[in-house]
Image (cartoon, rainbow, N blue to C red):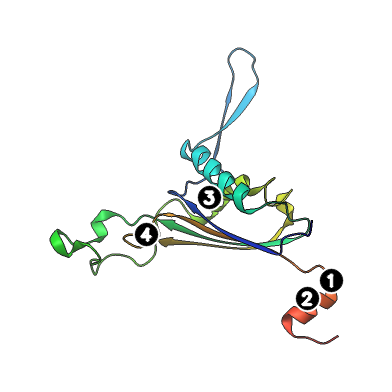
Amino acid sequence: MSEPREIRFFVPGVPAPGGSKRGFIAPRTGRVIVKEDCARSKDWRAVVALCAMEHCREQFAGPVIVEVIFYVPRPKGHYRTAENRLFDLKKSAPLYPTTKPDCTKLWRSTEDALKGLCWADDSQVVDQRVRKLYSLYNSRPGADIVVRAVAESVDAVAAAIGVTL
């Protein structure tokens, strides 16, 4: 089978952060146990993995570029009240979600879910763009994910940027 050049898919659900760990010593064994700090990240990673399995039939073998747009729900307090609420944002409502969780934490949980499904190792991700936006009023929260193979030869890179060697 030939390696996929690009895959695109949407993951429905409220994105959950990952990366924060909590460690403690087990009383019986005296061993250190490390657990995820955010309980929601397990569910989010499961949904990401399910969507990835549907769209990524085989792993990318070489370097990849990943683009992710996380859509988080806009708080109800950003909308005007009564019948004008449907699409009418308050003037004071921010354009971008600058509250927690940050993009890095959202990316960590998503990257953990994609590893082993879309690529074998995180070191294959050589370029990434991660954005966090509010979902529109009637649209679902979630994430748009694009994984693209990177050309590995000098000639292919030169052709892609329009340079003649």
Q: Position of residue 88 (x, y in %)?
A: 23, 67
Report helix, strand or loop for mark 3: helix
Of the numbered discs 4 and 1, the one sitting upstream in the chain is: 4
Q: Quadrant of the N terminus?
A: bottom right
Q: Are marks 1 and 2 in contact (CB under 8 Å)?
A: yes
Report helix, strand or loop for mark 4: loop
Q: Quadrant of residue 21?
A: top right
Q: Position of residue 107 (x, y in %)?
A: 56, 53
Residue at the limit of the structure toward the top, as seen here? 28
Q: Position of residue 40 (x, y in %)?
A: 46, 39
For the question of whether residue 147 can be seen, the reply is: no
Q: Which amino acid type is shown beneath numbered disc 3? A: Lys
The residue lying at 32 percent from left, 59 percent from top is: 138
Residue at the limit of the structure toward the front, as seen here? 1
The residue lying at 55 percent from left, 43 percent from top is: 45
Q: Quadrant of residue 24?
A: top right
Residue at the limit of the structure toward the bottom, as seen here? 164
How far is disc 2 from disc 4 in space, using C-alphas? 37 Å
| The one of 147 and 124 positioned closer to us in this rendering | 147
Using a 10 Å C-alpha cutoff, classify the residue at mark 4 as few (fewer than 14 neighbours), some (14 to 19) or many (20 or more): few
Rendered position, 134 above or below 21: below
Q: Which amino acid type is shown beneath numbered disc 4? A: Ser
How far is disc 3 from disc 2 in space, using C-alphas? 31 Å
Q: Which mark is residue 105?
A: 3
Residue at numbered disc 2: 157
Residue at the limit of the structure toward the left, as seen here? 82
How far is disc 4 from disc 1 in space, using C-alphas? 41 Å
Of the numbered discs 3 and 2, the one sitting upstream in the chain is: 3
Using a 10 Å C-alpha cutoff, classify the residue at mark 1 as few (fewer than 14 neighbours), some (14 to 19) or many (20 or more): few
Q: Which amino acid type is shown beneath numbered disc 2? A: Val
Residue at numbered disc 4: 139
| The one of 109 and 12 positioned closer to us in this rendering | 12
